[in-house]
Image (cartoon, grey):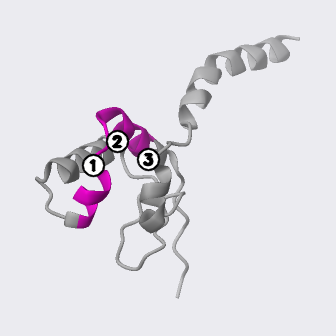
Amino acid sequence: MRILLTAALSLVVASPALAQAAPPRPSRLGLCAACHGETGEAVVPGVPNLAGQRLDYLRAALQHYRDGSRDVPVMRAAIGPLSDAELAALARWYSAQVPTPAAKP
């Protein structure tokens, strides 16, 4: 009985953390997924994978692309009209994705 109670309490405590681990799919994901893939695995050669990148790094990078301090015209055009909330949602999504291990040659 004690083990069952401990397990139940552990699930209750872990529930908020589990909910945070799976962010909702951003409404603007298709814009990014065209090159970076829906799960952050790039579908276009030369485009970086975003899966599992640090949240703060992704959020800052997106803001820098949008404001032009990172001068990549295609990125600025793609995310220029997005709000801070939309950029944050995209950063949360990609940071929560699990990268696929690279295939060995």
- Residue 45 position (above or below residue 81): below
Number of dots carrying numbers: 3
Mark 1 vs mark 3, foreground winner is: 1
Report if residue 82 lies within the magenta region: yes
Pick whichever, 65 or 8, lies toward us: 65
- Residue located beneath label 1 in the image: 62
Distance Cα–Cα, label 2 vs label 3? 12 Å
Q: Position of residue 26 (x, y in %)?
A: 50, 42
Q: Which residue is at a point 61% across and 30% down the rendered structure image? A: 18
Q: Which residue is at a point 63% across and 23% down the rendered structure image? A: 14
Q: Earlier in the sequence, mark 2 or mark 3?
A: 2
Distance Cα–Cα, label 1 vs label 3? 13 Å
Pick whichever, 96 or 30, lies toward us: 30
Instruction: Report helix, strand or loop for mark 1.
Output: helix
> What span is colored magenta in the figure?
74-92
Q: Earlier in the sequence, mark 1 or mark 3?
A: 1
| Amino acid on which the number 2 mark rests in the picture | Leu
- Residue located beneath label 3 in the image: 95
- Residue located beneath label 2 in the image: 87
- Dot 2 and dot 1 residues touching (CB under 8 Å): yes
- For label 1, the crowd category at 10 Å Cα-Cα, with few meaning under 14, some 14 to 19 and many 20 or more, is many
